[in-house]
Amino acid sequence: MTSSSESGDRLVHDDMPPALSSMWRALKRGYEAEPLLLVVAFALSLLAALPDALLALWLKLLADGLLAGEGGLVVAASVGLGVSAAATWFLRVVSDRTQRRFRDRVTIALESHVARLQASVATIEHHERPEYLDRLAVLRDQVFVLDHMYMSLFTTCGWILRLGVTVSLLVWIHWGLLLLLVFALPTVLTSSWRPGVERVAEEKGASADRLARHLFLTATTAPPGKEVRVTGVGRRLVDQRRAAWDRWYGPVSLARWGSAWWHSLAWAVFGGAYVGSIVFVSAGLGAGPGNVLLVLAAGARLSAYLGATVGEIGFLRGIWLDGSRRMAWLEDYADSLDESADLPVPDELKDGIRLEGVSFAYPGTDREVLQDVDLHLPAGSVVAIVGENGAGKTTLVKLLCKLYPPTRGRVLVDGVELARMPAEEWRGRLAGAFQDFFRFEFQARRTVGVGDVVRLDDGPAVETAVGRAGAEDVIEHLTRGLETQLGPSWPEGVEVSFGQWQKLALARGFMRDHPLLLVLDEPTAALDAETEHALFERYAAATRGDAKAGFDGSPDGRITVLVSHRFSTVRMADRIVVLDGARVAEVGTHDELMARGGQYAELYDIQATAYR
Ligand SMILES: Nc1ncnc2c1ncn2[C@@H]1O[C@H](COP(=O)(O)OP(=O)(O)OP(=O)(O)O)[C@@H](O)[C@H]1O
Ligand SMILES: [Mg+2]
């Protein structure tokens, strides 16, 4: 995929798909998940709508029968009323049960669908880009109410059916009563316009809302607790949260009040028309009491039905359309990244990885954090990357892991563009540990084992990985060894120190036996320099095919990319890359770079002096 079509795609995927097709797609998802339940629940909710709507008819017939002294009609109308009442109750119970069952099942199906989509997206752009984050935050909240969308659709259809029956009854009395519907139009308009206006205000303030939540969590949860107390920033956080919330709520509340006012006005118009219609039927048409009763009952129902219909449609627009559009967007987005990767990942590396004129700016930003990077990472070598904070080391690692495509230039793996290899397959051949590792709060065995999901429960593999990372001491300290539950918030869960978590993360990174690329992005920052040095010496040995390191030592051309700020570790790499302000400043071995007397030599001397 070229970089221009890449940016073209991005533009497209900033827009959400059209409403109706999204809704249709979501409906299909529900049908795929639970076809029978969906059909039955839908049919029942339609059936349940009928008895209620026919009430006005029975009342009219009853009054007519009584006035004309027709016993048969009175009995028929009374039976109709009785059956209506019983059926209303019965159908409501049955349809509630069915709907609840459908909801429970479809919720799980949709939640899994959204979670799978999010996790399967090949890049992590959607986790790092503000506009997408806002969109996904809303979807994440909505996913728990996605089941309401189906209920809402069923209910809407039920209300429309009631409305249809009621309108037919009114027209049966006099077609002029159709005017009632015209007077009801403003209520339809304000109801359907309302949620949109409120949602726009909500979405506009979404980042303030996200900030407020973030600040709330920061002020109230355990992980930041220590720093919050030491710095005494707690009060400030509370105030800032309040301010952020106000920034979100102010405009939202204003929008809500404004729309409520117009809505009330519209209903006042309809109320006037309803009174007018009763006067018209009784005085104007001189209709009998039966017909007046029907208009009275049906007219009153009309307003209730109409209110319910438009309210439900509003809800549909707000939640269903919006939620389904977000879901459709995520589906399209995930699809769009499902690149046309047509070339296999090689079994072993011969030449290595080459970066040609690689530049990169994070999506949604203009600043290039990598610029015209040309690099060769030879097969079977250990390459160290050094540079100041923010120089782009982690970014370079992310590009190598195919978490992002370069904005310009290409990454070649043994001469083949990385862009043309399936991301999943490539990542299957990666191993490594990251600066911002995650604490998987599982049993220690699994915390390490997830490094190679297919061997999650492979005991010997986990133990080997622990050995490679030099994390045996962590496991020894755990009361139940590898079976210990980690994370104090779980039953019998224990907390381990930051350095211990990091060692486990490192072990996780070593689960795979034959990675083509091993990335170590400051995974040992919490360890002491000596331990780090000893560990890296072993990785280096493994990379060079030495069997003693606990790796099986087959020289499959593995490349180790190591990011570290410790020059004592860095110096033993085969090749050292110095990044400076988004560019490659120097490349060479330790001796070459020292002889050159450039930036590396200078930094090395500073650290060496400090240690002396
Ligand atoms: N997700 C992101 N979105 C936008 N900009 C980012 C993102 N991540 C990093 N950056 C920017 O990219 C630049 C390089 O960051 P990077 O994390 O690659 O630096 P680094 O060399 O690894 O630094 P450190 O030594 O602190 O780990 C920084 O200026 C940073 O602000
Ligand atoms: Mg970094």
Image (cartoon, helix red, strand yellow):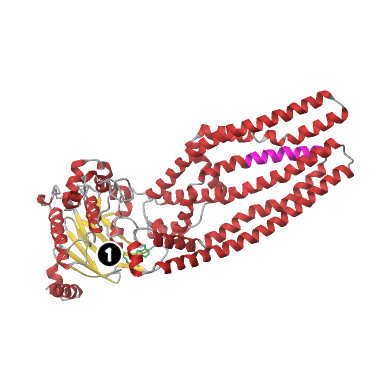
- Magenta segment range? 156-172
The residue identified by callout 1 is: 393
Label 1 beta carbon less than 8 Å to ligand 1: yes
Q: Where is residue 186? Give x, y as percent.
A: 71, 53
Judge by depth and name the residue closer to the eye, 457 or 493: 493
Q: Would residue 346 be found to the left or right of residue 216 on screen? A: left
Please name the residue shown 31% across and 55% down the image. Answer: 402
Residue 557 visible in the snapshot: no
Judge by depth and name the residue closer to the eye, 63 or 277: 63
Q: Which residue, as the protein is rendered here, is positioned at the far top?
A: 72
Q: Is residue 378 above or below residue 83?
A: below
Q: Main secondary structure of the magenta part?
A: helix
Q: Where is residue 324? Give x, y as percent.
A: 52, 48
Q: Quadrant of residue 8?
A: bottom left
171 is within the stretch colored magenta? yes
Mark 1 is surrounded, within 10 Å at the Cα level, by few (under 14), some (14 to 19) or many (20 or more) other residues, namely many
| Image quarter hosting the N terminus | bottom left
Q: Would residue 441 be found to the left or right of residue 196 on screen? A: left
Q: Where is residue 53? Give x, y as percent.
A: 71, 36
| Image quarter hosting the C terminus | bottom left
Judge by depth and name the residue closer to the eye, 184 or 220: 220
Q: Where is residue 41? Give x, y as percent.
A: 56, 34
Q: Is residue 595 above or below residue 513?
A: below
Q: Amino acid at mark 1?
A: Lys
Q: Quadrant of residue 168?
A: top right
